[in-house]
Amino acid sequence: MSGSCYDHPQYWDLAFRDETRLEADFVRASARKYCDFPVRRVLEPGCGGGRLVIELAARGYDVTGFDLSGPAITYLRRRLRRRGLMANVFEGDMIREQIETPVDLAICPMNTFRHLTSETDARLHLQSVAASLRPGGLYLLGFHLLPNDIDPESSERWTARHGRTRVTFSLKVLDSNRRRRIETLRFRLQVTTGHRQPRKLVLADEFPLRMYTASQFSRLLKSVPDLELLDVFDFWYEIDHPLELNDEITDTMFVLQRR
């Protein structure tokens, strides 16, 4: 059988499951380091199937999450009910969605931001998140920067398992246009579930993603004066070891603060 990744959020979440605890730990560490108030209300725009929403809710945070994907939000609501957890989740567009009661912290990890393929949409998103944060609140924004010497035909592959389900995730760059600042990626998930009569499923999608160098993102951030860059980390999230923003760093987590 074959289908779209969007229609099976449980397998996408499983592929990135190992990142969840690290991300949630970084939320806590960032709150302790940069905020002089208790961080209780957390927002995740573009939350997908909600692996991080679930983890943060289980840790006692008051979590709000939204995503354009109806199947993902339906799946997330079902998981919340099954776990006996509470969170405010709904379908929403991360370009313009704003939260009426300001949150203490927002997080958007793992390249979701790059799905906004125009400079205008990216700026609107940053402005919307800033408007959803209390003064002094944080936005933890994670995505891959693209240094000038990166291989334009790069690929990645890994396997994740849970119980009798195995997901092999493959990522391949199909096209890279630095002038237009768009690269096209193919995501492919090979899923095997069950034991005696295994069920096999292949999920595949192609996505255009916006490309950023360090200087390009810095220019974008300067156009959103409500947000200030505090620190930069890689995806090891070592809170005591911030990095320099330059063309050497690729896996990048920005700590932004609402002025």
Image (cartoon, helix red, strand yellow):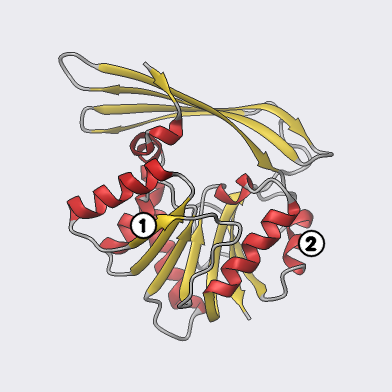
Q: Quadrant of residue 15?
A: top left
Q: Quadrant of residue 176?
A: top right
Instruction: Examine the rendered structure and indicate whether residue 169 appears above or below residue 106.
Output: above
From the top left corner, tell me how far across and down residue 124 is, in percent: 67, 62
What residue is shown with label 2?
A: 219
Horizontal relation, residue 206 to residue 18: left or right: right
Q: Is residue 226 above or below residue 12?
A: below
Residue at (35, 20) in percent of width and height? 201
Residue 175: x, y in percent? 71, 27
Front: mark 2 or 1: 1
The image position of residue 108, as x and y in percent, is 51, 57
The residue tagged 1 is 53
Q: Residue furthest top?
A: 197
**Left or right: 207, with 65 as reference point:** right
Other residues around mark 1 within 10 Å, as few (<14) / some (14–19) / many (≥20): many
Q: Quadrant of the C terminus?
A: bottom right
Indicate the quadrant where residue 234 lies: bottom right
Q: Nearer the viewer, residue 180 or 78?
A: 78
Q: The residue tagged with tag 2: helix, strand or loop?
A: helix
Amino acid at circle 1: Val
Is residue 108 among the parts visible in the rendering? Answer: yes
Cα separation between marks 2 and 1: 30 Å
The answer to whether residue 238 is visible is no
Residue type, mark 2 in image = Arg
Which sits earlier in the primary sequence, circle 2 or circle 1? 1
